[in-house]
Image (cartoon, rainbow, N blue to C red):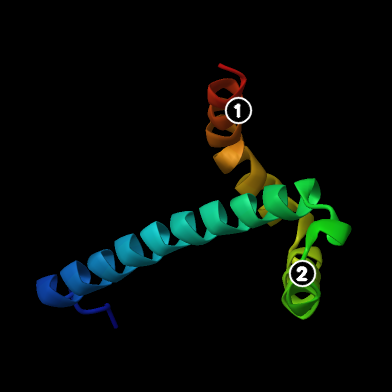
Amino acid sequence: MTAAAPNPNEVAMLRAEVEMLMTERQVLLTTVGAASVFVANLHAEDLPEDAYAAGDVLADALNKLPEETLREALELVRPLVLKDMEDAAD
């Protein structure tokens, strides 16, 4: 028994869905990378007390990420962070 040929409409829909998910993944990785850099450079004593709970949630979520994912996220935002640092030095 052979498999039926894929329906071109289904293939197009799946392709669009995969592309959308890959785009969303890039946005999420950028967000994670930026949040990681932000947390790493933040001094807890500079935060208003009202922000402590949100900071703990963010730090906990970042700590739960697989190391490979976090590394990928940091590498993605690294050029942006370096550019911001250069701009701030000027």
Comes first in the chain, label 1 or label 2 = 2
18 w.r.t. 38: above or below: below
Query: Could you say which disc has been placed on residue 82 in the image?
Result: 1
Query: Could you say which disc has been placed on residue 72 in the image?
Result: none
Rounded to the nearest whole Å, what is the CA distance between mark 1 and mark 2?
27 Å
Residue under label 2: 48
8 w.r.t. 79: above or below: below
For this rendering, which residue is in front, 8 or 35? 35
Q: Position of residue 89 (x, y in %)?
A: 62, 19
Q: Quadrant of residue 31?
A: bottom right
Is disc 1 placed on a helix, strand or loop?
helix
Is disc 2 placed on a helix, strand or loop?
loop
Type of amino acid under label 1: Leu
Type of amino acid under label 2: Pro
Q: Position of residue 19 (x, y in %)?
A: 31, 60
In the displayed structure, does residue 61 sit left or right of residue 75? right
